[in-house]
Image (cartoon, coloured by chain):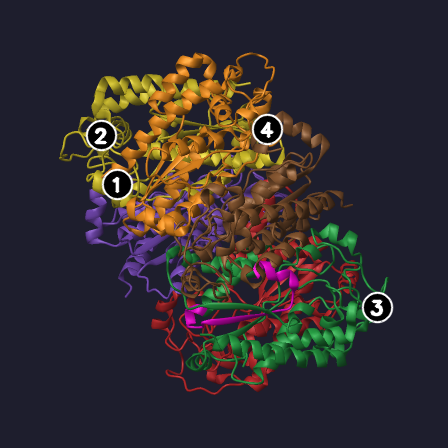
Chain colours: A orange, B brown, C green, D red, E purple, F yellow
Amino acid sequence: MRLQLSTWQEVEAYLGRSKGIIMPVGSTEQHGPNGLIGTDAICPETIADGVAAKGDILVGPTLSIGMAQHHMAFAGTITYRPSTFIAVLKDVIGSLERHGFERIYFLNGHGGNIATITTAFSEIYAERSMAGEKGVLRCRLANWFAGRRTKQLARELYGDSEGRHATPSEVSVSYYAHPESVKQAQMEPKVAPVGEIRDALDYRRQFPDGRIGSDPSLASVEDGRRLFEASVEDVAEDYAAFLAEG
Amino acid sequence: MRLQLSTWQEVEAYLGRSKGIIMPVGSTEQHGPNGLIGTDAICPETIADGVAAKGDILVGPTLSIGMAQHHMAFAGTITYRPSTFIAVLKDVIGSLERHGFERIYFLNGHGGNIATITTAFSEIYAERSMAGEKGVLRCRLANWFAGRRTKQLARELYGDSEGRHATPSEVSVSYYAHPESVKQAQMEPKVAPVGEIRDALDYRRQFPDGRIGSDPSLASVEDGRRLFEASVEDVAEDYAAFLAEG
Amino acid sequence: MRLQLSTWQEVEAYLGRSKGIIMPVGSTEQHGPNGLIGTDAICPETIADGVAAKGDILVGPTLSIGMAQHHMAFAGTITYRPSTFIAVLKDVIGSLERHGFERIYFLNGHGGNIATITTAFSEIYAERSMAGEKGVLRCRLANWFAGRRTKQLARELYGDSEGRHATPSEVSVSYYAHPESVKQAQMEPKVAPVGEIRDALDYRRQFPDGRIGSDPSLASVEDGRRLFEASVEDVAEDYAAFLAEG
Amino acid sequence: MRLQLSTWQEVEAYLGRSKGIIMPVGSTEQHGPNGLIGTDAICPETIADGVAAKGDILVGPTLSIGMAQHHMAFAGTITYRPSTFIAVLKDVIGSLERHGFERIYFLNGHGGNIATITTAFSEIYAERSMAGEKGVLRCRLANWFAGRRTKQLARELYGDSEGRHATPSEVSVSYYAHPESVKQAQMEPKVAPVGEIRDALDYRRQFPDGRIGSDPSLASVEDGRRLFEASVEDVAEDYAAFLAEG
Amino acid sequence: MRLQLSTWQEVEAYLGRSKGIIMPVGSTEQHGPNGLIGTDAICPETIADGVAAKGDILVGPTLSIGMAQHHMAFAGTITYRPSTFIAVLKDVIGSLERHGFERIYFLNGHGGNIATITTAFSEIYAERSMAGEKGVLRCRLANWFAGRRTKQLARELYGDSEGRHATPSEVSVSYYAHPESVKQAQMEPKVAPVGEIRDALDYRRQFPDGRIGSDPSLASVEDGRRLFEASVEDVAEDYAAFLAEG
Amino acid sequence: MRLQLSTWQEVEAYLGRSKGIIMPVGSTEQHGPNGLIGTDAICPETIADGVAAKGDILVGPTLSIGMAQHHMAFAGTITYRPSTFIAVLKDVIGSLERHGFERIYFLNGHGGNIATITTAFSEIYAERSMAGEKGVLRCRLANWFAGRRTKQLARELYGDSEGRHATPSEVSVSYYAHPESVKQAQMEPKVAPVGEIRDALDYRRQFPDGRIGSDPSLASVEDGRRLFEASVEDVAEDYAAFLAEG
């Protein structure tokens, strides 16, 4: 059940049955020579829909822009400053809480979002911690690529060529979601270099075609389907546990 | 051409041909008994894709959340505070400008966004006006429903039943985009009341089912198709004029 | 009754009789070759006093600085960034609400303020919409030049020479208020060009002497008196209706 | 020369002769049983006009709202939070600097503004100190009541009955500026108590009629004239010294 | 009793006996050729410990960074912008208030902090003044060097050579606290010049070695001991009076 | 070499030899029944001094308050909201960069700080990434307890009783630094429970005496000495590598 495709009365009725919602959150950033700029939003959105198909689960609108400052030297990247992203998350969570949602599950597609989303949760919790108020709200951040099944499958498929950015896993899932957008590109070296992330020009200097440690030429629609299925299982299990928490 | 479905090299190449981009911007808010919560995002996104299909035009990711504080007493609405929305627009525009985009065309689906988006443009322009710097950046806000052809068609189709919120026009376009999500609902009175917009509880008191002045039971997929085509023509014309400005 | 010329006990007594107040709001910005920099503040202040003279009506201090970023390439202009202006309005409205004012009527003299003031109202309303609290506060934005009688008279007096900035109407009203400050200036062309507003250097390039579409050489003290009287009638009527709203 | 009553060309010409401007800054706050709410704005505005009458000196628009949180338990008081006031001062000073003003002289009427205005100057200076940039801008804060002649005259006229808030001096100057607004009121005790300032309810508890340590029943239009003249001399001297600084 | 060296149960027990706490607050800034960069934090920290040794008094962690923008042209200075410092103080005070502290005594070592700390108190009080809430919180700002005994001793020891920044008094107290860090330096002229404080480069131009009006070559460990003792007495007396206030 | 105990000339000279600095960063928060509130600041400060003793290394002032919102239900905890902490880090880093520091090494003592500090780095880098500017600044976050030798020793000493908060390791190091402050306390159960961190009241409900998963009754001064030595070696190695990076 997609929030965007529901009426308010349908959402009101849903809230009588469940206090949980899955919010896909991604980024709009370069993903190397053959990866889509929307990869990090496409993956969690697709997987969230897969999870929702298995039960009475509501999926909110995808937050398709995230914290991608380090990719700004590559055309097409759009970033929030962390402070903007925190404000976005505060308002989204505050809106959902206002309607009675109590378990908000952010299904994330971008490693670079983790620190900022975690910080946003703390900013929200701090409000009530300072006031000495007891909140019922619980937020969880989960990464679609970090579940047990998904990680194991990625390891089997790509081993050390998985790397850290523009990975064959995420490119595969995005191809599975958009087979019409599969891209061909030459890449040199086959496996990209690794290093530490700082600002955008420094990133481009270290990682000239955008990849970190990966060989996304290995990506395929079929791998994407398998990774999608593994992640749907991982996420469905974790979301159910989140709702069941005492 | 969708930014989300392109690689960074494709965007870099596009920038050699054009400095313009269309950014759909909407809202996640109640649209009465038979309207989708995502209506305001779905309409401009669909029309932007229609415009892009006619030429070498890039469409960015849809900003699907907007300024909807007045709808917060209806389940499922998600709002940015105006200050958050301004921060979002500053970062989105700043990111695009960084890559060399000079004409950013926001195709908007929500009347309640207009003041805040206009204010965001002023906040951005103020920065350079205070610094005495000359900017090449031009932003335009256009509403998909406000072009000549589109307004005339809506008038023909619905006359005074068009109203101001949850209009049959926008519901029709969203049904055209998502025919699987057409909803049936009883509405009383047939045409909703009108009035001034203030805070959320006041809104709900005045407009109990969410509509303002409209009868969206008139909406249909076929009307949606016609309105879509009219708006695509209006927007394509206006966008071309925007790019051609001296 | 001017707030600034009252004691706190007089205001306390007034609040026993009325919950309404008129707040003149203007701008400090260039108004072409013969217009005063204070025009946008002088006009609503003068008209508010005219309205107050007709009844038991309190007029607050004039907010004489507004959103004028686009005029910053002309000496003497002072602008708030929109974010500052929003903070100003939040504190002014919050202070008045604290004392029990429930209907705050902003009588505005500057078209460029409209989006920001509207946004500020939304920012304030959003606070309670997010909290699910019911507010009694109502804010209205009215432009002294937009009432029925005033617009008709301006049309009669100046037709197409009224234009959009540094209009003969507003210059006339400011001359009526300050006849000692009537200015003489040569203007070329007689009627100024029109165009879209962006940042300050762009504005100066398009509108070299500051006017947009107007011929303020037509302004006179006598016209100012007539426009003042028309506007006082328009505003008094609208303010009474605002107080009477259920 | 009043900025508000000048054209932009007149200000441009003035800047060829002087880089200085006087900005009156006050507050909108209770001033005890017989003092006007606008006292703190009226006094510096009146005195600034007196100073300007003696030379080629530009006076900007009065900033009539200041930091008055402690007076909020008395009807009619309007306050900026300090953070808002700092934003206001940054934009005002930034606007003036943009046009080439280099010496900005804030003539203040409210003791409670001093810390915040001083802090605002530091916030502005910090910007360039962090950037390692050399600024030519100089801001000065001067209180109309703190010059040698003015303090001596106040001491002669009222001795210990001058007190700290709602002083006979300031009430007298406001009466001199607005003789039509002289108020009569009984006050008990004759001289008000003294104490430390904290929040609004605490203030009202300590100082029930708003005065601190003063007996403003001593105020008169004639005293106001003498204090005005003394302060004009003090301020003119200090402003000339400010402009002459190397 | 040092907060940092206590357990939470010890603090909880203390709160049963007292609602007061001393918070040393300083700066990290140049102090001329022979003064330590930490002088302004070291002095109040040392004196607070001295006061605490005399009774059941809790001392919080030293806020060792303050508002030092004007010293930024000297290596090693670290400054908060005033707005950051205000945020810091809001959170520190808010945290302490949350636990039940009602009298928070800031023992300050840096004149340049006074305006910002005072402004921070107003920002905090404004919150409850706007809300019409009664607070029990009381904050006091006291300077270790401003008590009766301390000022008199400094006058006896150094007369006019005390000056305003990098004074022999503060250097002496820091030497008493850290005799291993006594520095030797040549200074020319013996007594430094005086002037007004603006931005960092302007400061360095006026005061090339960092001192204002002082001769800190007079400083000694023994003087430091005497000043420490005088200040401990002054502060202990003032803190006791603060706690005893009705 | 301690910044606080140096003169500005000494720091200027140091900058001729090195562009690096170690900044200890901690928290002021409950550490269970026998842990000191200052533990997280004391540990990195002590270890930083140990590292500095081995070479020509500058140590800045300890940032002793951090992000501890989840501990606010325990007396004595002081927290920054994440947004405040980000502002603090921006100003501290900006100040150091202004003087020519290029490698800023934050030696952290609190796991709860990691997300916010990482986010602060991104906020700073974003500034230059948006501007398209190349920065030379590099920030690193290192945790004193996370080096190879230190982790191994902690495992040897405490195994599973190390836990996640109020660990015997950190308590030991704080005891080594302050043997006069060793505390005795009964704890039930011996090893504390584990769980997820949310807001303060939720934390206290889950972890009633403040510990998470640890048995700090195992802590001792002697263990502290060994852990200190291990960590000094780990940190010295990592800091040297940081300075040596190309």
Q: Which residues are magenta?
A: C97-117
Callout 1: few (<14), some (14-19), or many (20+) C-alpha neighbours within 10 Å?
many
Please state which amino acid type lies under the numbered disc 4: Ser
Q: Where B9 sits versus B188, above or below? A: above
- Between disc 1 and disc 2, whose residue precedes? 1
Quadrant where the N terminus of chain C sits is: bottom right
Name the residue tied to disc 3.
Answer: C185
Q: Nearer the viewer, mark 1 or mark 4?
A: 4
Please state which amino acid type lies under the numbered disc 3: Ala
Quadrant where the C terminus of chain C sits is: bottom left
Which element type, helix, strand or loop, lies under badge 1?
helix
Specify whether F226 is left or right of C55. Answer: left
Identify the subunit bearing mark 4. Answer: B
Whole-percent x and y of residue E210?
56, 42
Task: Answer with the quarter of the image where residue B11 lies.
Answer: top right
Which element type, helix, strand or loop, lies under badge 2?
loop
Name the residue tied to disc 4.
Answer: B6
**Residue F213 badge:** 2
Q: Are marks 3 and 2 on the same chain?
A: no
Please state which amino acid type lies under the numbered disc 2: Gly
Q: Give C58 or A189, whichever is nearer the viewer.
A: A189
**Residue C40 badge:** none
Q: Nearer the viewer, mark 4 or mark 2?
A: 4
Q: Are marks 1 and 3 on the same chain?
A: no
* Res. D104 visible in picture: yes
Identify the subunit bearing mark 2. Answer: F
Q: Is-magenta flag for residue C109? A: yes
Whole-percent x and y of residue C236?
58, 79
Please state which amino acid type lies under the numbered disc 1: Tyr
